[in-house]
Amino acid sequence: MDFELTASMMCANYGNLEKEVKNLEEGGIDSFHIDIMDGRYVPNFAMSLNDMRYIAGAVEKPLDIHLMIEHPNNCIGLFLKNLRKRDTVYIHPEAEYHPSTTLQKIINAGMVPGIAINPGTSVETVMEMLRIVKKVLVMSVNPGNAGQMYLPYVGKKITKLIGLKEDMDFEIYWDGACSADKILEFAPKGVKGFVLGTTLLFGKGRPYAETIRNIRELKF
């Protein structure tokens, strides 16, 4: 089965980031997920503009920039000028007065536009934006911290999005508490990609290439 795997870099070992990104890329990861947090939209600070800039210059694979910040339109240019045409930028619609304006800036810069949907955000409230974006990142946990528990009602939201994605031309990606059973359940239903963090990828004491290969060889 064809699905994408992206590494949640806030979970990486920052004692040797150069080695981490090299091992992940050589190990077969499809993209690098960069969580930018401002301590306001979510109660945490995570990766920075400089972290993003370094990884963008160190890898060939695409980046997925997840902006968990208030009013991203105010500073979106800082991120866009350091990215490549194949990179994706996700914003949270609740964090912006006019999210479609921010999405249009991402489109105009040649990047892939996306929205991230929190567990408490209904599909109905973002319906119009689904025709603008190319990717929808569904949060299965509340944003802001790694290692949280899966919120089971998110599965019904994914079912709704699967019914809309072909008509509205977007792909669905899973973020948060991503275990093997979630991939086994939701990849066949139409979820395109999965963000891997501490549940499956990081801190396991095994080479990334081995872990990634084992995930791709799951029996559906």
Image (tube, rainbow, N blue to C red):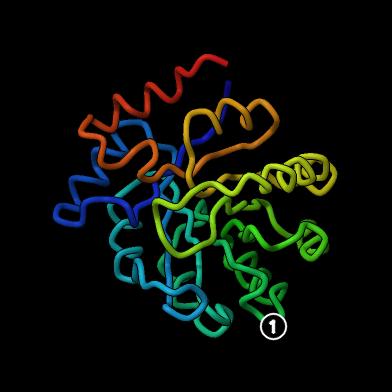
Farthest right residue in view? 167
State the quadrant of the C terminus: top right
Report whether 135 appears left or right of 42.
right
Provide residue 24's location: percent of width, then percent of height: 30, 39
Provide residue 70's location: percent of width, then percent of height: 54, 80
Disc count in the image?
A: 1
Closer to the camera in the image, 155 or 166: 155
Closer to the camera in the image, 150 or 212: 150
Instruction: Label 1, secondary structure: give it.
Output: loop
Report whether 144 appears left or right of 128.
left
Query: Within 10 Å of the Cα at label 1, are there few (<14), some (14-19), or many (20+) other Cα atoms?
Result: few
State the quadrant of the N terminus: top right
41 vs 186: above or below = below
Q: Splitting the image into 4 quarters, where does residue 54 fall?
A: bottom left
Q: Splitting the image into 4 quarters, where does residue 209 fall?
A: top left
Q: Splitting the image into 4 quarters, where does residue 73 fall?
A: bottom right
Residue appearing at x 29%, y 24% in the figure: 210
Provide residue 147's location: percent of width, then percent of height: 39, 51
Q: Provide the residue designation for mark 1.
A: 97
Residue appearing at x 37%, y 29% in the figure: 212
Q: Mark 1: which amino acid? A: Tyr
Residue appearing at x 61%, y 30% in the figure: 187
107 vs 209: above or below = below
Residue appearing at x 33%, y 28% in the figure: 211
39 vs 208: above or below = below
